[in-house]
Every structure is written in structure tokens, then in C-alpha cells.
Image (spheres, grey):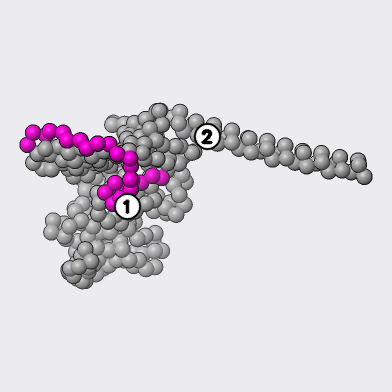
Amino acid sequence: RALVDIKEKMKRLIYTLLILTLIACQSRKDTVDNKSIISDKELFGKYYIMGFNSNVSLQLMSNGEFVYENQYWGCTGGGEVRRIRGGFNVNLDKLSLEPQSLINISYSRIDREKIEKDSIDYYSSDSTYLKKEFQIFKWDSLRYLLSEEYYSNWGYEEVENYYEKFSNHYNSDYKPSRRSSYFVKRKIRFPPKNSLNISAIPKEYQKRFLKEPIFAEIIEVKEIEVDYENEVHQKRKEYKLNKGRTAGVMEKMIFYGEDECCTIRINKIEDEISFGRIYLCDDYQAECGNGDTVSTYLERENGKFKNVH
């Protein structure tokens, strides 16, 4: 009986040691993977989102601290900067921000005198909201911070998250530029040479990154009444395309006309057809017409399609 008890205790001890060893190995693996990201010097530096008379930057520093700035500038001078500081953590390809302090800086329109309010502890509100969770995505020398959130950095409704915006940019024949609507850090004059590793993108967004452009024909244009800012009913043109879900079309995809001005965002989709409206303002957009060819692809050099099929 005593011998049986000893054997059982030995089994439990061996099992416990095995579990502890596995946990230690996994912890070591996580530490190594984490260091492999942190030791990547390309991770550190400033990431930008560029807008008109405004930009958002997120600077990651090697000491584990970040500085986030949301800047607005008036056409006649003056502006505001909202600066948030804190720490960040990296776990594999995930970045988490931990905001700590907030300061607002104002510039006079006339003499650009800087007026700073006292730094205060960070608090979350409509005007101070900060996206805190990102995927660190690499494409050669480029580094992206991609978020699934739909909150806008500019204060108005955002209909696309960073993955959706990135996919539309990529589908249009991506060429790195200084303007972007998601966080990116790039080396000027060092465009990516290798293909985008789409498998590193979360699965729910992978089909948005097209291997071949989708070409479609506008088969109907009609006016519909839509709500504008939930108050005013206005007429807008709806464009019906002869391609739908079976051809790979997805909601929020953007199609371009040959002149680069006609940009249609898909907002309704069926198996064989899809519907969309002009992406930018109607008053300065070139009209798309019935029978016109549109595509997810946009050749930026001269605005002409190639390999139309």
C-alpha cells in the first residue's frame, strides 16, 4: 500500500514538473518573440495620418513611451495641438497604448503665440478619445499600425476602419505617399519590393486585398433620397454595377472611373450586382455615366486603365 502511494505521488510530481516546464518554455518563447519586435529599430519613430490642414502623429520611443498629437491648422494661421503621452506594450505583433497625461496647445492666428494649458491626467471623451489597440504590420521597410476600430481621428463619423482603408488603397495600385488615412511610417524613396503578405492580415479582411482588379460596368444610374446628417433629405445618385458578390465585390470597396474623379463606394451588394454612391462630394466630382467602365484599380501615373477585361 505504501509503495502504491509513493508511486502516485511521484506521478503527480512528474506531471506538475512537466506542466511548469511547458509554461516556462511558452513564457520564454513569448519573451523572445516580444524582444524580436521591440529590437526591431524600424518599429520606433513617428507614424502619420495626413489630412487637409491637419494631421495625427504617433511617436513610439525606444524607452517604451509614446507621444500622440492631433493637430489642426487654420487657413489664416493659428491652430490647436492635442498631445497625449503614456507608455506602450508590445506582445508579438500587437501594440497596446496606455495613455497617462493630456495637454492642449493653442496658437494665435496673428502672432502664433503658443498658449499651453497645464498638463492633466488623461481622460477619455469625444475630443480626447484614443485608439489603443493596433496590429504592427510590416511590408519591407514600411511599418503600419492598423486598428479595427471605427472611431474617427477627425471627429466625424468614420465608415471604414484602417484595414478597410488600407485594402482600398492597396487595390487601387498602392504607391507609398506622404498622405494616408491610417498610421504608417515609411522611408521616402524606399517603396516595397516584395509582395504584400496578405496572410498576416486578420482573416476577416484578407479577401478585401485583391490579387487582380475587378472591372465592372455601370448599368443603371438613378436618383434616390438619402438622409444627410440624420436631418435633411437630399437627392443622391445611386450607381448600379454588373458585378457583385460572386465576382469578389464587397461592401465599402471603391471603384474608379477612367478620369480618376468618379469614385464610387459600394454600400449594397447582391450575388451578381452591386450598388454604390459617389465617394467624395457631388458638387466637384466628375459624373459617372450609364455604360461607363469602373474598376477597383487606379493607375496613378496617367489615370488610364490597363489590362481591361
Which of the 4 quarters of the picture holds residue 257? Answer: bottom left
Vertical placement of 273 versus 123: above or below? below
* Residue 127 can be seen in this image: yes
Q: Residues within 10 Å of mark 1 (few under 14, many from 20)?
A: some
The disc, 2 or 1, on the residue closer to the chain's N-terminal end is 2
Element class at badge 2: helix
Q: Residue at x 36, y 36 (%)?
A: 86
Q: Secondary structure at mark 1?
A: loop
**The quarter of the displayed image where residue 11 is located:** top right
User: Mark 2 — residue?
Assistant: 33
| Region in magenta | 110-133
Q: Which residue lies under the disc numbered 1?
A: 151
In the image: residue 73, left or right of residue 91: left
Residue drawn where x is 28% and y is 31% of the image: 188
Between disc 2 and disc 1, the foreground one is 1
Asked whether, in this view, residue 166 is left or right of residue 51, the answer is right
- Quadrant placement of the C terminus: bottom left
